[in-house]
Amino acid sequence: MAGSPRGGRLWWPRPTLRGWALLAAGILLFLYGLFLERRDALFLGSFLILVPVVAMAYVLLRRLRVHVSRTFSPAVVAAGSEAVVGITLQNLSTRPTYGARWRDQAERGIQTPESTLLPSLGRHGRPDEGDTARLEYTLTPRRRGVYGVGPIVLVRSDPFGLASGQQTAGEPHDLVVTPRVTPLPGNALSLTSGEGSMHELLRMTNPNSDELIAREYRPGDPLRRMNWPATARHGELMVRQEEQRSNPEARLVIDTTLAGSLRTATGDRRSRMEGAFELSLEMAASVGIHLLDGGYRLDVIETGPSQLSPGTERTHGGLVGDLPTTYRVPAGDREFLEGLANLTMPNLAIRPERSSQPPGSALRTIGMKLPTFAVLVDPDPEQVRELAILRSWAEPAFAFVLDTVRQEAIDALEDAGWRCVPLRSARSIADAWTRTDRSAVTDGA
């Protein structure tokens, strides 16, 4: 990512503590000489006042000219994980640069290091003098979102340390912070029904399969599925893998309206909803990546206006008319996580617009029952009714409900055939998924 070739915004230079001391002494001597008519005091006071002014002019005229480029490693980072920010500065001036300091800037929510000394830069076009410097630091974003990082701030002072000035260099770049993804039990939904997994129930929705292909062995694969001829050919352990002739499909419903709290979410309730919304996106990310890793085509339905793939005709929500957003591997996992990173907390003071379309009218697979997983924060009665209608096209149908969901909503969903699984914290994500697995096994038996 390249930045601007020159310094950006420039702050007017200011005296340092030493410069202010000289100015104060000069003013006192000037006043002393003025009132007592002492020419020597007037001369010395004028000199002391002039020195910091000249120092500020020096800093102003000797501003840095640099080219800045910035990279993130990794380019997309999960909340709570580390990212290395790499900054390359190249001196564009024919004069060497030394004695400057630098610090980076970032939006609220990202902690950057304090200012530090900038390595000396040689004259432009003289690589032997070291006209380029590489800077690195590590940051750890705590919350999901898209954060602007940069531009860097360069601090330059005069040789005597009497004045200093700041200028920005480069351009800000977005750091994409995705929700945390919790590894879920099961080998990406690839276990067989004989071992008691949900895969058999999911596979029943796509019965056309051919077990003649092989893939590499993964920890947890049953030994009875070892493909010894393929192992001999490839020189590594291989197992038999079902090859779906038609891509298996699954649905994921995300509560992006929090419609049940439109009139009551203030103060502590609003803060609680924010935490629940972030937890719901962690659960959605974990389930979605798990399904994509299992080879499923994933249709993501937002209860509110589409943020994953916005459009002028996608303003009602996926339950009532908007087409779902579809993801497939190999690129779908990253697109999905980046989409979740961009989701914003709904404005609880604005009631979402209702559509005249019947629930489920825009599903891509009308008439086919697909595995459906919903992550709910606080649906209102109308959305509960829409989910109850959606149950007709879902098998199995699991709803992960946070503690902000009202009991009457849970009861209505269960009466409609949804299996509701409570979700209390990020630490219980894997356990919540295990409960759906056990329920599927019970139903399959």
Image (cartoon, helix red, strand yellow):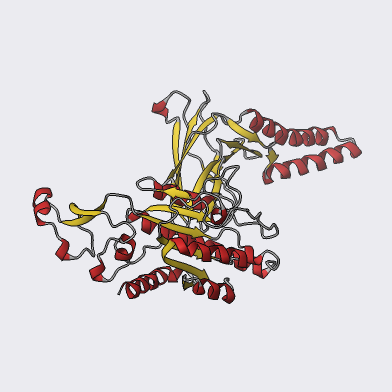
Residue at x-position 23% and y-position 70%: 194
Instruction: Work out whether residue 223 can be spotted.
Output: yes
Q: Quadrant of residue 346?
A: bottom right
Q: Is residue 22 above or below residue 408?
A: above
Q: Which residue occupies the foreground of this view, 378 or 398?
A: 398
Would you say 12 lies left or right of 332 here? right
Point 49% across, 70% down: residue: 425
Q: Is residue 8 left or right of residue 376?
A: right
Q: Specify the farthest residue to the front.
A: 367
Question: Residue 117 at what x, y percent from top left?
Answer: 51, 43
- Whether 171 is drawn above or below 188: the answer is above
Where in the figure is residue 71, as x and y percent of width and height? 45, 41
Q: Position of residue 99 (x, y in %)?
A: 54, 38
Where residue 123 appears, as percent x and y from the top left, is: 48, 26
Residue 279 visible in the displayed image: no
The residue under the point 11% across, 51% down is 235
Residue at point 72%, 33% (across, down): 53
